[in-house]
Image (spheres, helix red, strand yellow):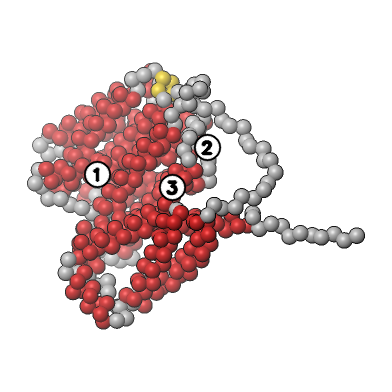
Amino acid sequence: MTTTLEPRTSLDAVPRRRTRASVVRRFVGGFYLVMGGINAGIVAADPDTYRTFADGAFWPFVTDTWHDVVMTHPVPWILALAAGEVVLGLLLLRGGAAARAGWVGVIVFHVLLMSFGFGFWLWSVPALLVLVAAARSDWPALGEPAPVAATGPVAAPPPLPPVDGVPRSRATLASTWVLATAVVAASLYGLLAETPYRSLPEATVVSARAQDACSIVVAVLLVLLVRRPVTSVATHLARLGLLAYLLYSYLIYVMGVPMNRAFLAYVVIVSLSGAGLLGGLLGIHDRPPVSGASPRLTRTTGWVLVVTAVLFAGLWLSVLVPYALGGSPPEPQGVGGTPYPVFVLDLAAVLPAIAAVGVLLLRGRAAAGALATVAVLKILTLFTALWAGPVLALATDADVHLGPDAVPSLLLLAATAWLTVRWLRSFAPAPSTASTPLHERSTP
């Protein structure tokens, strides 16, 4: 009697390879999307940054073309290049036949980059080894459905009861009214006082006053969101996102603005918004609300958050590391040469937190969807307030100052607006499901 040992099917190995390639594709897509924004922001801030880009090219016509054509009118040419990077990123994130075009584009981009000199080979050669291998693994899955391995029944974990309602306590209502009153008072002081932001550059003062106007709108929204005794999960998460915006913004006011008559109002805002945000986040941890978000939305948001955190950390470190190694002091600085508050908050807390939420999303954690909704809404609100500054400067004929993060923040503004709408809709209660309240902590 003979026994034939059949080899195990490779169906389980193929999805793993394709999954790894898909992860690389989404990372590269997010990388190109954000790098396009960063390049556009750099050229908008200082077009001469790229003047020596082709000085080490192997062929003279590359150097001559760069200086005589591109650098003659650098802004439109570099913006066109940045737009191309954004398009490649979107193609890779889109998947399917579009991603095939994206793979070809990024590989050709790196091959052409090598013509600018040997220094670019140190980046392009390792990058091409990764890109070509990932494209080869990902290519078959982009044109036809991935194989499904035949497996036995797997016991699924019992679903969590859906959370359709969030009771609003009297403490939450009272603290929200106090918080909104403090925000309006501090904002009106910033808008109406003669010198509320003394010793700050004029561009910073314009941005601060534009942010004050946005903060009044946020205060009104907070009051509207808590007017009902029981609110929806989406409303609850929107409130937490607005509290995160206030906490971040007024921590900057507390640390980075010369002390003025509104300082105590800033302290009240930081205390109440921080307490309310902490209580809401603890409630999400204890009783995660169930989201109807699609796997694609979950993966896309996860990678957007991770890439955003990594790229903005790199942007700040590109200013701080040279100074640590003996270079010139970073710009901007805080009042009196103190550290710029954005550097402190982003590198110490905000960017690590955003990256952590992105990783939780990619790992499919129960609370990740709710946390991501708070994170993208905070980003959306913050960048809306930041861009209100240049808009106000244009309206008042003041000087418009755009930093290197201007275009990346504009791209994030558009992306997070779309993501916020999608995530808030994903928490809409099912019509046939009984409401299960998400109990808040005792903190406001």
Choose the circle earlier in sequence order: 3 or 2. 3
Q: Position of residue 135 (x, y in %)?
A: 48, 63
In the image, what residue occupies the spot 41% across and 56% down?
98
Real-space Cα separation, disc 3 to disc 2, in angstroms: 17 Å
Q: Earlier in the sequence, mark 3 or mark 1?
A: 3
Q: Quadrant of the N terminus?
A: bottom right
**Residue matched to label 2:** 366
Apparent side of residue 386 relative to residue 20 in the rendered image (left or right): left
The residue that mark 1 highlights is 386
Tell me, for residue 300, which label it has, or none. 3
Which residue sits furthest right? 1
Tag 1: amino acid: Leu
Q: Residue drawn at (30%, 45%), measured in percent from left and top?
A: 413
Give left or right: position of 161 versus 117: right
Q: Secondary structure at mark 2?
A: loop
For the residue carrying disc 1, how many other residues have a C-alpha within 10 Å: few (<14), some (14-19), or many (20+)?
some
Name the front one of labels 3 and 1: 3
Residue at 67%, 48% (x, y): give it.
150
Which numbered circle lies on residue 444? none
Confirm or deny contact between disc 2 and disc 1 (CB under 8 A): no
In the rendered image, which quarter contains the C terminus?
A: top left
Q: Is residue 300 left or right of residue 193?
A: right
Instruction: Tally the marks.
Output: 3
- Name the amino acid type tagged 2: Ala
Image coordinates of residue 246 in percent, x first then y, are 30, 35
| Residue 220 visible (yes or no) | yes
In the image, residue 425 lies at what x, y percent?
Answer: 40, 33
Q: Nearer the viewer, mark 3 or mark 2?
A: 3
